[in-house]
Image (spheres, grey):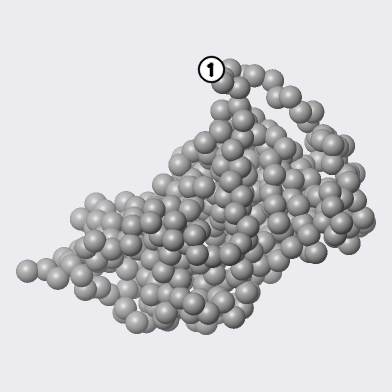
Amino acid sequence: MPTPDRPLGVRVEQIMGTAISIDLRDPAISPAAVEAAFDHLRDVDARFSTYRADTEISRLGRGEISLDDCSPDVREVLERCEDLRRRSDGFFDVRATDARDTGGFLDPSGFVKGWAVEASAAILEAAGARNYCLNAGGDVIARGEPEPGRPWRIGVRHPEQIDRVATVIEVRDVAVATSAAYERGEHITDPHTKRPPKGVLSVTVVGPRLSEADAYATAAFAMGRAGLAWVATLPGYAGSMITSDRRLVWTTEFAAYKSASLPAS
Amino acid sequence: MPPRRAVVTLLATVLGLVLLFSFKTPDGPVDAGAPLTVARAAPTPGVVSTTGSSPTSQPGSAAPAPPQASPSGQPSAAGSQQIDGAVVQTQFGDIQVRIVESAGKLVDIQALQLPSDRRRSLEISSYAEPVLHDEALQAQSAQIDTVSGATYTSEAYRESLQSALDHAHA
């Protein structure tokens, strides 16, 4: 008999410049499916990287090719990014980023990672996975339960301490994305002012799709403290924000996810 | 523990400011295209307009201060200040919030503009939960399965909680 309450092991691979963890809690999922899930991320990374000069994205950013010359995947990504730009009043803007190594001005990576991870999750599901957690550099898809009767407990990283969490949520079947300015030096800026937003340390968005949650968190962070009110307008999505004076604020819907089992200090 | 009960427990036991905004919308059918009643700010959103005499104003900002769409601009009480956020235009309508700070601490978030059909979603529970260093949670005691955070570099991952959790379950 399977023992579903025992983790079957976490696999970690370094892809897209970050660590991708797949934590499968279903027994008898083919290792080949896990490989395929990782391979998909490597494939997307190769095709969408802004750090390589020869990708379609880089060439499009430099104006060497037009959107019509691009593959259907690239067109889909850019169409969805454009939709997000409109819906976020320009705060999510793949063309507002600074020039990167390639000299291009087009960087959809704030959407692509979540979009790619969604597809990897679909590969796992096609192989029968129903209870798993996929964590791509802090952006999470959590499906089913880690063990029967218990929700996934996801810590929201403390914005100032890498080994601590600021709050804990309990979820089943959601995506969770957090945007902050604590790493990489490529701080999120408000596309309208080209300046970092004020008053906010991190924004976490919870909802059905990781591609959207990731973009929403990015946009809300760029909006500054107004961002949380914007998240509250998004159907099906909840959010929380850690302000620069170290307070946690959240939308009504987010309260349903918050764990009460917070240890005393 | 059921989430609903968990929330009740949390809210009932922690001292702090709990604000529940209930934004009034006209009774009866709401015309999705109903005009908003508050003037729109200039197309320079994103700048937090600091009103009153604030040390957090942005003298270096190239963007002009947005026109005031609301009767803000006055410190509401001794030691407190109001900061109106930019107007964010969404598919549902415009959003603008006002931040009230006192002695440098966030004490209130008020909605100046809200889409008329988003009433339920736009209740924001603003509760000033401290996330001070000493009170931050350690993974072990918090018993978490995974961590959400902004993108880990490979180097940062090695120091992260997520790395420790992955090792524990590998």
Give above or below for A157 relative to A208. Answer: below
Q: Quadrant of the N terminus of chain B?
A: bottom left
* Quarter holding residue A232: top right
Q: Chain of mark 1?
A: B
Residue that numbered label 1 is attached to = B29
The residue under the point 45% across, 42% down is: A236
Task: Give how far across and how far down residue B154 sits, in percent.
Answer: 52, 76
Residue A3, visible in the rendered structure: yes
The residue under the point 44% across, 56% down is: B8
Amino acid type assigned to the residue bearing label 1 in the image: Pro
Left or right: residue B7 versus residue A241 is: left
Give above or below for B94 relative to A160. Answer: above
Label total for image: 1
Q: Going by the picture, which residue comes out furthest to the left?
A: A1
The residue under the point 26% across, 53% down is: A125
Task: Give how far across and how far down residue A230 sits, in percent.
Answer: 62, 43
Q: Nearer the viewer, residue B70 or A161?
A: B70
Q: Residues within 10 Å of mark 1 (few under 14, many from 20)?
A: few
Q: Nearer the viewer, residue B15 or A55?
A: B15
